[in-house]
Image (tube, grey):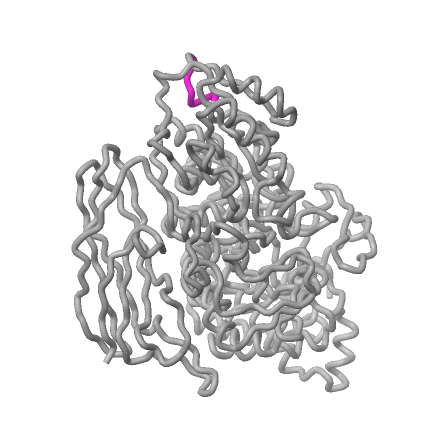
Amino acid sequence: MVENSKPKYNWNLFVGLKTEQIEEKAKKILEEMTLEEKLKQMVGMYTQVQALRLIPADSDGMKLFEATYDDWMAIYQAINKGSDNKRLGIPPIIFSDGPRGVVGPRMNIRKPTCFPVAIARAASFDTDLEERVGNAIGIEMRVHKNNFYGGVCINQLYHPRGGRAQESYGEDTYLLGEMGSALVRGVQKHKIMACAKHYAVNNQETTRMQIDVIVDERTLREVFLPHFKKCVDAGVASIMAAYNFVNGIPCGHHTHLLRDILKGDWNFKGFVISDWIFCIRNGKEAILGGMDIEMPWEMQMQGKRMKRLVEKGEIPLHYIDEAVLRILRTKIGFAHPQGDEKNYPADLSACEEHVQLALEAARKGIVLLENKDNFLPLNRLNLKRIGVFGQYADRVITGDNGSSRVYPEYVVTPFQGIKRKAGERIEIIYNDGLEIKKAQEMAKSLDVVVIFAGFDYKSEGEAIIEIGGDRKFMTLKPEDITLIGEVAKANPNVIVVMHSGGAIITESWRENVKAILMFWYGGMEGGTALGEIIFGDVNPSAKNPCTFPKSEDQLPPFNREAKKATYGYYHGYRFIDKYEFESRYPFGFGLSYTTFSYSNLRLDKNETETNGQVQISVDVKNTGNMAGEEIVQLYIGYKNSSIDRSVKDLKGFGKVSLEIDEIKTVSIKLDVKDLAYYDVESRSWIVEKLEYLVYIGSSSREEDLLKASFKII
């Protein structure tokens, strides 16, 4: 073949094809491919590996690279170039990560928007907002010349110490599915292939390469997979297999997960890629198990080796053809016109609209956990001097330093945000809090002290280069607890702002402070949002996407060093309900500067059939003295079920904005099919004919819920 010869197929002609036309074109191209060309489609290819200084993995598989930031940028831009088939015109996959924004942009293009971490966005319970975030990310992906977004992380927060809690949407499968599918829809509007990860049961980080998670089939189907199914139903282009083992089998080889469930039961039409480098242990087993692409370069699925196995009949050719057909089908389905780059100019990256969206997401993600005597919001007219304490209060911290890290042009720190929003007449003083006595002495002369306390990439996050991983404890760090205690002795007006990817136990110090805010990691405009909320320019509306327990006894067992773990049917608020605990800040809980009342709960029918639908409505009134937003949550319980079931499960939510004294009706539609349980013996989903309990209100806590019921006949 002449190197510069014209490719046979013009991908530009595939734009806008219907489903049946896409399938026809993909099959036609597949027929014309050699085995070598097919195998090239099935591996990532990084041509500059030599630029990296590879370090042999240690026994835990944690030590991977010692590479500069520029090295990693080259990886992200060069990924899967091997699938760039010049003869046939097949384009490459060009990968970028997430979910805080676009990871790995080209250095000659404007830097991207850094949104709050996913769990902060989950606290908004706002799928419209998440879809708009996805839309902005999709635009910036196009600006940065990428076409594959690996940032739809829907790992379940099985335990709050899970290292990558910040990258996902919390503990509940329904919330995970709603938010994850919203992100998929937003990103894919711009012909960007979205990837949902990490499939499946990938909920511990420190030993993510080795851990074998034992889980029974019903728990797998009902607890750990529905959110992936919802992303598949939303049309997600790709699924990333996880590093861990499930029931003794690596996820990258897992026939039951990949072939039986994903490609079989769910009829997933896209392709499966591996998590990077260590996901696949054996190339033959991976292909037989359902793997389509090894990332980020060919190792176990090395082309010459796989070709020999195909020729010997050890890998049937139809497995190769099926994988490549999936890849071609997806590439064609996401084709966009050559030359439409003019619609995605560089100045769209971190444009004012996207930055304002990041600010909106930060505002709607900060949870007000405590507010004694309505101490917040602060009245600017009554204050002269405010202290902002804490070693991270004036540092750039947007989450961990792993594959989700985004490098924006700037980040507004909490100190900067509070200072800007305080106004010129209030003096804002910073102290890093490292010298406790000095901080305590300073606090005596201040009207209010805001203590910023929590974690950074060294304490929680993706486990790379001996940092991050699962958090070691559920409380704040000892030095933060000491700082809070000693400063509170000197000044009664202390506000604690916690930054973390998951819940924190506050029992040892919460009584000593006036207010507690959960900041998570707020993105590039997080400090601005924090300042606005503290001074009442914005009314907090966020709710907990995970349970804040009183003690770790209220959580399932968790060992961050475990190489084997059994995951049960219950965790989070379902665990709290099952064992009749009282959590400190429940799932779905969050305070406002106003108050809301619920009344007139009603159902459009009292009985329905197994394929029916019930509409549930409630009136919500703003009974306070400030406009605000309320997140209405719907839970369903199962009266006299024949099997062990949750006390209640989240099955819907809605958001309402109310002026003072305003009343609005919130209606949520419930599909009866979503009440099914998985019957292991018949391998089917069954909706029981019984009485279902309806709970609707402001959190998962029983006293916050109105109750009704209906029957399925």
x%, y% of residue 372?
37, 34
Q: Going 47% across and 38% down the picture, which residue do you hit?
A: 510
| Rendered image quadrant of residue 483 | top right
The quadrant of the picture occupied by the N terminus is bottom right
Q: Percent position (x, y) of residue 595? A: 26, 40
Residues 338 and 195: in front is: 195
To which quarter of the image does residue 532 belong?
Answer: top left
* Quarter containing the C terminus: bottom left
- Tell me, yes or no, if residue 110 can be seen here: no
Q: Residue 183: percent from the left, percent from the top?
A: 45, 54
Q: Is residue 421 magenta?
A: yes
Question: Is residue 482 visible from the viewing direction of this image?
Answer: yes
518 on left or right of 94: left
The location of residue 523, given as percent across then percent down, is: 51, 38
Query: Which segment is the magenta one?
Result: 419-424
Tell me: residue 79, above or below residue 87: above
Q: Compared with residue 241, is residue 171 higher up or lower down, i.e. above or below?
A: above
Q: Residue 4 or 543: which is nearer the viewer?
A: 543
Q: Image point 54% across, 31% down: which residue? A: 484
The count of marks equals 0
300 and 693: which is toward the camera: 693
Residue 7: say if magenta: no
Camera-side residue of 97 and 200 = 200
What main secondary structure does the magenta stretch of the protein show? helix
The residue that appears at 66% across and 71% down in the rendered structure is: 250
**Left or right placement of residue 451 versus residue 690 in this view:** right
